[in-house]
Each structure stands twice: as structure tokens, then as C-alpha cells.
Image: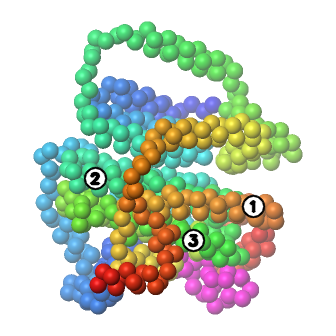
Amino acid sequence: MLIIIEQIIKILSLIVPLLGAVAYFTLAERKIMASIQQRRGPNVVGFFGLLQPLADGLKLLIKETVLPSSANTILFIIGPIVTFQLSLMSWIVIPFDFGSMFIDMNVGVLYLLGISSLGVYGIITAGWASNSKYAFLGALRSAGQMVSYEVSLGLIILSVLIITNSLCLSEIVISQAGCWFIIPLFPTFIMFLISALAETNRAPFDLPEAEGELVAGYNVEYSAMGFALFFLGEYGNMLLISTFTTILFLGGWLWPLANPFTSLFFQLVPGYLWTGLKVSVLAFFFVATRAVLPRFRYDQLMYIGWKVFLPMSLGFLLLVSGFIFSYQLQLNNCHHLLTVEQIEIFLADHTSYKDLVDSIVRKI
Amino acid sequence: MTFSYAIIVLYSLLLSCALFVVLTMNTVYAVFFLIFAFFTASAVLLYLGFEFLAMVFLIVYVGAIAVLFLFVVMMLNVRYIPWLKKDLRFAPLGFLILAFFLLLFLFAILHIESDIYWSLNIPSSFLSTNLESAHSQISSAENTEMLGTLLFTHYGYPFLVAGYALFIAMVGAIVLTLRHIPLPSKKQDAYVQVTRLLSTVRLLAKDKA
């Protein structure tokens, strides 16, 4: 019984801050876009409009849920639930700080890829079950886009994995203790960011929701909480892919120039704040891109995905593996570094963090 | 092999999903049951401790193949198939296949060792140093590493041959569906656009204005 309560509290302690982050990400998007377009943005509800997301949530909650008469009711209800559920499920493997994750899965990267590939189903289910042409076209576009960009995304992740020699997310972060992967793999980082925009159906690749052509894409027929679940799921996915980029390329919870001898100042800031800072920068990038760039045409989108990113990421994979093979740069598998005892030591005595990172750096 | 209630639940879920794929009238529901069956199969693999295979199963079957199935079924717009209740022409064939697989499973069960790991024919490099380290190598669930070693060192050439077979299949599919359109199509060439001289672009803009 106690174990069940503990698990529930653990799950809630992950989900509740996440939902708060998602809600305030929507407010941040409206505010940033407003300031780019020289408007004020939401500033009425609460101090500086800070209660706006709560008001929006309440509005969506008390609106009427409309079930179209020609829709397939079961799938119509399941669609948004699946999208929202999958966007929450991914977060269990994300390490926010050293040793602070829900599950330290040793195939964490594959888990994230698998869950993100399942994300197509929520959208395609909603689009088909709505029994509307706009919704179906939007869902087909979205599914096609997500499936094609997953290929290049996977190849880019592979070029990171070849260096780290591990599929475990916290090991990927620890192996960046010497140098963040954004420095040696900068072109891949750029490609990853653009693919991430396409994967999350964001501007300039937000063709599934193209207002001019498809009204609102796969969620035209949804109202009230169904729409809210899609909305939260999408923004959650955006934050997730920002965090994933942080872990893969920006060194996760590590401070800049993570050299334990020189950065006594940086060490004062705890690791999860570094993660949060990096994720915020990437989230800002997501919003700023939407405000700055016009939408792509669908054939241009597919052209970039299949004819530019796929060959380039394949070539980069070959280049990286060639470098590693010829210079024997492969890192040792540092799985033994994350034993239970070390995490316990870390939790018991926070000051030993420096020594631990010291030892890790020496081993690498 | 460990035997528990969880695995019984998973297997029965898998079997009932597979049954519903055949029995349901709605084709889209059938595909969804198929997806659920794949999902359960991946859960079974996860339960048995093959987490790499489970994730690859999830990514490849659920994430790619079933999406294409769903695409085709939804686009064809065949919602209900006529259910022929008394058509038992293919029943003998089905029973034959069933008998074959039953025999196969019986054969496999009789030949499997007590532990499922040892039936995988682990290369000697994992066992060479000492038993304890070998055991830790295997049971620390690094079956990604084990599979990699097996595939790329012990079965390198079959792996390459399999890759070429898939490649040829892909080229074949492209050759079958490629149509050469003789008319000049309005195709955008990004390279030409980007490498255009600035002066010509300005001239074009002036012409338009």
C-alpha cells in the first residue's frame, strides 16, 4: 500500500510541474510573439497576465464537448487521450539532474524514439474518426511528415550514439563532461533542430494545421477538453524535444565548459537549473521561429526531409564513425559510473558532486 | 524460463488481440487490434528482458509498418467487409499451419536449456574471462551490446546480405512505380534559385514592377 502511494506521489511530482511548464510555455509563446510583433500580448488576467493559462484552462474545461454525429465516437474520444498520454509517457526517462530521473533505462534513447513514433496514432485516429475532409487531410499530412522526419532524426541520434557508445540518456550527458556535442557535431545539431521543428508539427513546418488550407487540420472537430488535450500534448512534445536536444547536444545538467577545476562559480548553480536554462533557450527558439519564418510548401518540406537531411545525416554518420574508427576515440562504456552507491553518496552529500565529476572526467 | 501470472496475462492479451484482428468487421478496428497486438508482443519481449528487441519492435512494427497499414486502410475507405460465416474452405489449411507451428514449438521447448540466455548461443568471448564477469555482462541487461557483437562480428556477412536484399527490394519498388513525365513540369530547383546571380534577380524584379 505504502509503495503504491509512493509511486503515485512520484508520478504526480513529475506530471504536475510538467503541466505547469506546458501551461506557462503557452503564455510565454503568446508574450514572445507579441513582443516580436510589437504588441502587448495577454496582460489583463492577473499580474502581467500571469494567470492567463489558468483562465484558458478553465474556459476549455467548462465549454461544451461536441461529438459530431457522423464521427466514430470511440476513436474520436481515444485520439486526444492517446496524444496527451504519449506526451507524458516520454518524460519518465529524462534525467533532469545527476541521478534525478524516474527510470534510468539503458535503452532510453530507443524508448524516446519509440514513443515519439507512436505519437502518429493519436493524430491519425483523430483525423479519421472526425469523418471530415479537412481533419483527414491534416492527419495524413501530419503522419507523413512525422514518419519522414523520424528517419533523419534517427540517423542524427545515431551519430551521437556512436560517440557515447551507450543508449542510456544519463550516460550520454556524462560523456559530454569534457566537451558538449554541439561543438564537434554542430551541423548535426542544426539539422536536429530543424527536424525537431518538423517532427513536432511546428512553424515553419506546421502544414497539418495550415489555417489557410485546412482550417485547423486534424483537430477541427474537437472542442473543449478534447482540443485542450491535443494542445497540451503538442506543447509537451515541444518541451520534450527541447529537453532531448539539451541532453544530446548541450550537455544536459552539466555547466558550460564542464571542467571541474575552473568552474567553481558555475558549480554554485544546481544541475537542474542548468537543464531548465538550456531547455528555455531552445523553447524560445521554437517560438521565435514561428514568429519569424513563413510556412513551407508541402513538397518543399518533403524535399528537405528526404533529399537534404537524409543524405546529409547519413554522410555525417559515416564521417563520425570514420573519425572514431581511425583515431580510436570511442569512449569507454561508463555504465559502471552510475551505480546505486554513487547516487546514494551524491544524495547524502551534495559537496561530493565535484569529486564525482572529477573522477568521471578522469576516467573518460 | 520464469513463468508467472504476468506473462499469462500478456500472452492471453496478445492472443485475443490477434483473434480480434480476424474476427472484427471494421477494417480500421482490425488494424488497431493489430497495433495493439504488436504493442503487447513488445511488452512480452520487455518482460522477458530483451529490452532492445522490444524497443526495436515498437519502432519498426508499430511506428512504421502499422502506420502504412493504417494509411492504406483509411484511404481505401472500406469500412465493413462482408462476413462470410460458413466459408470454411481454408480451414484445413489453417489447421495444417497450426499443427506445423505446434510441432515447431514442441521441438523448441524440448531442446531449450533451463535458462533462456544459454539457448542464444552466446559467443565464447563473453564466457572466456571468468564466469562472474560474463554473467554480469549478460544480466546487466546489456543485450544491445550482445546483439551488436553477435550481428557484426559473428554474423557479419549474413547481415550484409540481408541489407542488400532489402536494398534490392527497395530499388525494385521504385522501378515499378517510377513514371517519366516527358512534359516540362513546374518543378522547383532550390540549387538554381540559390545560385542565381543577384543582377538577374534584380532585373526580374524590375520587370515585374
- Labels 2 and 3 within one chain: yes
Residue type at tag 1: Gly
Secondary structure of the residue carrying numbered label 1: helix
Residue type at tag 2: Leu
Going from the N terminus, do you reach mark 2 or mark 3 first?
A: 2
- Please tell me which residue lies in front, A275 or B136: A275
- Labels 2 and 1 within one chain: yes
Residue type at tag 3: Phe
Q: Residue at x 64, y 71 (%)?
A: A185
Magenta stretch, residue numbers: A254-275
Q: Is residue A47 above or below residue A230?
A: below
- Disc number at residue A137? 2
Q: Is residue B201 above or below residue A96?
A: below
Asked if the residues shown at circle 2 and circle 1 are in contact, with their CB atoms under 8 angstroms apart, the answer is no
- Please tell me which residue lies in front, B29 or A64: B29
Mark 2 to mark 3 CA distance (whole Å): 31 Å
x, y percent for residue B170 = 55, 41
Q: Residue at x 69, y 76 (%)?
A: A179
State the residue lying farthest toward the right.
B129
* Residue pointed to by mark 1: A322
Q: Chain of mark 2?
A: A
- Please tell me which residue lies in front, A96 or A364: A364
- Disc number at residue B135? none
- Disc number at residue A189? 3
Res A33 → quadrant: bottom left
Mark 2 to mark 1 CA distance (whole Å): 43 Å
Q: Nearer the viewer, mark 3 or mark 1?
A: 1
